[in-house]
Image (cartoon, rainbow, N blue to C red):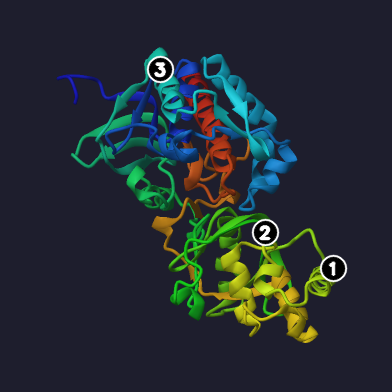
Amino acid sequence: MYKDGEEMKYDVIVIGGGPSGLMAAIAAGERGAKVLLIDKGDKLGKKLAISGGGRCNVTNRRPVEEIIKHIPGNGKFLYSAFSIFNNEDIIAFFEKLGIALKEEDHGRMFPVSNKAQSVVDALLGQLEKFHVTVYKNCPVKEVLYENGQAASVLLKDGSKINAKSVVIAVGGKSVPHTGSTGDGYAWAEKAGHTITELFPTEVPVTSSEAFIQKKALQGLSLRDIELSVLNPKGKPIITHRMDMIFTHFGISGPAVLRCSQFVVKALKKWNLKEVSMKIDALPDKKEEQIFQDIMKLIKNEPKKSIKNLLKGMLPERYLLFLLEENEIDHSEQGGTISNEKLRDFSKSCKQFQLKVNGTLPIDKAFVTGGGVSVKEIEPQTMASKLMNGLYFCGEILDIHGYTGGYNITSALITGRLAGTNAALFVKENSRV
């Protein structure tokens, strides 16, 4: 890996070749720093290559206020960063590299080519342009500090590389096959940093309800529903209107992923074994209106079976499930069913509740909640407040957003700031 007698000294060492690490290495290179990028895997940009279903959702075009709202985990910390380099700057950055982007639903930005690899290749081209040295298949054992400053990086093979500043960009603990296995937390703690409790976010939710265990609705998708997580008094903590799917272990899909961190927090906050979630399958109609619509249908054709009367109102499997939940035989004639049962059914359409008991583990999550406390990070530079020449970016920080381009936006912006300022730190200190 090393030429004999090679001076192993760099201005900036970036550890981690994901979105934030690649951006940090490029930003430091642009500032004229001698940069080394170290990754323990055999490929850089692994997470980028699989993001957005392999199409790579590079950022989101919504206004900054909206983006911050979609980063419920310490998004406000990013206000300063956004004032320096924001989502529109990310778009301009990629377009300058020849990656034409297009906007899709909810502001998500994708390459026109629909190929994540084109984004990764453009970033790798920038590494070459700025003469960034890259070591792959190269696990780091620890970051060494001397006299209150980041000094060098010790590799697992025992070799030591000196640096004037170090950027830690090794990700969290989710999607471990891309290399995010939580290595960086110990290096941060050694520098005196606090690691807030880690938990899975953007993760499927588990339930031991009998109908889930029986797989009664497994594989059924509900489109454009409202899903809420309820507090112990039955009031919604959070509601998301998107799609969802029933699985063999619980529920998943976009609405569920967004609600998942609130499930984790509610279980912990109230020390519960289970919390309730509520599905509103017909969010555009009021309960009374649903009931009146059903009564009208029955009045017109009282001898028709309730299943056929209500056809198309809900996906068939869900319709039959809710009828059964309310002890209505789906083959029964509409005219013979009591108003009370029909009212209960109308209520179920709006507020079917299921108990959930947690989520899949952190290694099955898209995003890690928790990480290096942002209270100990300079918001405009991503510098450690506790150790000179040490910078953090990406998912190792206690910042987490919903899926839809928000986490990658945070990674690219914090990476840009960390790399730029790691290089500036070296310049300023070489003058002294």
- Work out whether residue 217 or residue 230 is closer to the camera in this orientation and state it: 217
Question: In the picture provided, is 393 more to the left or to the right than 12?
Answer: right
Looking at marks 1 and 2 on the same chain, the residue that comes earlier in the sequence is marked by 2
Q: Amino acid at mark 1?
A: Gln
Indicate the secondary structure of the residue bearing disc 2: strand
Q: CA distance from mark 1 to mark 2?
A: 17 Å
Q: Residue drawn 35% across and 31% down? A: 44
Front-lying residue, 26 or 343: 343
Q: Residue 225 has which mark?
A: 2
The amino acid type, in three-letter code, at marker 2 is Ile
SS for dot 3: helix
| Mark 1, residue position | 289
Residue 419: image x %, image y %? 49, 28
Q: Answer yes or no: do the residues labelled 1 and 2 have beta carbons within 8 Å?
A: no
The quadrant in which residue 264 appears is bottom right
Residue tagged by mark 3? 125
Nearer the observer, disc 1 or disc 2?
1
Residue at the image point whose x is 58% and y is 39% from the top = 405
